[in-house]
Image (cartoon, rainbow, N blue to C red):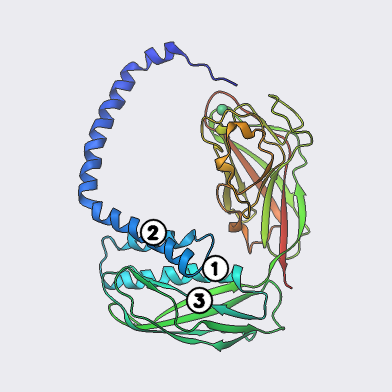
């Protein structure tokens, strides 16, 4: 629905607008000064993020290399004021954590797993004579190839292990078991070494899904109130931990009619709505946040499925997609819930920050799978 524009309010706000403009001029001078001081770092971060993306997609063949540029940015960001040896330390740590994450998706479930660990050197000094040894304290892991060398890595460079690590998961491992690993990296260069990184690998993938739906009365989302409203619901009787979770805004008959009672959430300005899901352990994921932008005036959400594996994000919808029926990836990954026990009270938190147009949360659910193994 079109929003009223109040010209009286605008006139009353004129002195405030002038004050804001002056603040903005001061703020611009401060920003230019900041840019003068830090442009080298900004450029470095940009180049490194691009290089990390290229390395992950073109050399490692990773299709959704989201974490590679993030790793580059984190490591460089941490090193802007800490040159040299601490930088080498930090850079290695971050890179190892990220690439093990890739392994879980790609390799587990086939008995023998191969592992490629690329490391970045975002420090100010080169690392040479690099070697690494992979070990596991679990009796269920048999390391087949546990040692490798790396080529020398100049400052801001990356390298993958020259021999792939490989290990075998014994049949005695329980599906869904978390396997502990240690990677010891030695090198010649700045910083204390060898460095040891401990990490774990989750076995198994998503098995069959169980469905848990909110069964209470419709809950009004308070108008323009940052506090929002909590809508609790219960999950019980689930065995195991969460391998994958999907969030559904339900509804029986989908329509863009304002105030419809057959949709999952009726709302007269979809772009105002922010939804977050909180688990019994207190972990929170924002599943949608002003989807389609603050000017998305579309009505209602109905049969909207949020699944990390979907090709397009709920954030990229447009007004014409209302009532947003279909499967979309969420604002933040639902994979954050992976490994948690789901039993207990969950909360859907709904907020509307703009004091015109709102609606009600009517029907929603989550689908959870525990770990399954082939
Ligand atoms: Ca609103």
Q: List x then y, in percent, for residue 271.
A: 56, 33
Residues at marks 3 and 1, CA–CA distance in whole angstroms: 9 Å
Q: Secondary structure at mark 3?
A: loop
Q: Can you say whether 236 is above or below 175 in the image? A: above
Q: List x then y, in percent, for residue 351.
A: 57, 36
In the rendered view, does 330 fall on the left or right side of 73? right
In the rendered view, does 111 fall on the left or right side of 227? right
| Residue 222 seen in render | yes
Mark 3 = which residue? Answer: 116
Q: Quadrant of ligand 1?
A: top right
| Residue 73 seen in render | no
State if disc 1 and disc 3 touch (CB < 8 Å): no
In the rendered structure, which disc, 3 or 2, sits on the residue that comes first in sequence?
Answer: 2
Q: Can you say whether 5 is above or below 284 in the image? A: above
Q: List x then y, in percent, for residue 171.
A: 72, 83
Quarter of the figure with the N terminus? top right
Total numbered labels placed on residues in the image: 3
In the rendered structure, which disc, 1 or 2, sits on the residue that comes first in sequence?
Answer: 2
Say which mark, if any, is on residue 102.
1
Q: Can you say whether 50 is above or below 126 in the image? A: above
Quarter of the figure with the C terminus? bottom right
| Residue 240 lies in quadrant | bottom right
In the rendered view, does 172 fall on the left or right side of 314? right
Say which mark, if any, is on residue 49.
2
Residue plotted at (61% across, 31% down) = 320
Of all residues, the one furthest to the front in this rendering is 58
Say which mark, if any, is on residue 283.
none
Residue plotted at (50% across, 80% down) = 182
Toward the viewer: 337 or 45?
Answer: 45
In the rendered structure, which disc, 3 or 1, sits on the residue that comes first in sequence?
Answer: 1
């Amino acid at each position: 629905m079109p929003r009223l524009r109040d010209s009286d309010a605008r006139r009353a706000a004129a002195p405030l607008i002038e004050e804001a403009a002056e603040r903005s001029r001061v703020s611009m001078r401060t920003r230019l000064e900041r840019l003068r001081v830090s442009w080298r770092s900004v450029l470095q971060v940009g180049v490194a993020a691009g290089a990390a993306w290229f390395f992950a997609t073109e050399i490692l063949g990773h299709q959704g290399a989201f974490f590679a540029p993030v790793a580059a940015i984190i490591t460089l960001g941490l090193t802007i004021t800490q040159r040299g040896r601490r930088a080498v330390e930090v850079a290695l740590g971050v890179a190892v954590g990220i690439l093990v994450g890739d392994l879980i998706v790609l390799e587990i479930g086939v008995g023998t797993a191969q592992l490629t660990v690329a490391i970045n050197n975002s420090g100010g000094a080169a690392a040479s004579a690099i070697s690494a040894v992979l070990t596991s304290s679990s009796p269920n892991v048999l390391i087949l190839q546990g040692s490798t060398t790396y080529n020398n890595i100049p400052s801001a460079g990356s390298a993958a292990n020259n021999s792939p690590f490989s290990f075998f998961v014994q049949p005695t491992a329980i599906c869904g078991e978390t396997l502990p690993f240690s990677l010891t990296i030695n090198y010649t260069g700045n910083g204390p070494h060898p460095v040891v990184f401990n990490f774990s690998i989750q076995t198994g993938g998503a098995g069959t899904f169980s469905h848990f739906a909110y069964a209470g009365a419709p809950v009004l989302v308070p108008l323009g109130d940052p506090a929002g409203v909590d809508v609790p619901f219960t999950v019980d009787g689930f065995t195991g931990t969460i391998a994958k979770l999907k969030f559904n805004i339900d509804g029986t008959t989908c329509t863009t009619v304002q105030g419809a009672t057959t949709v999952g959430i009726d709302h007269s300005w979809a772009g105002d709505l922010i939804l977050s899901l909180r688990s019994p352990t207190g972990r929170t994921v924002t599943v949608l946040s002003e989807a389609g932008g603050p000017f998305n005036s579309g009505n209602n959400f109905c049969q909207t499925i949020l699944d990390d594996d979907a090709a397009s994000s709920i954030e990229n919808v447009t007004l014409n997609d209302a009532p947003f029926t279909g499967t979309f990836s969420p604002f933040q990954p639902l994979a954050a819930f992976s490994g948690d026990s789901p039993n207990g009270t969950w909360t859907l938190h709904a907020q509307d920050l703009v004091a015109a147009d709102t609606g009600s949360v009517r029907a929603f659910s989550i689908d959870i799978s525990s770990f399954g193994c082939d």
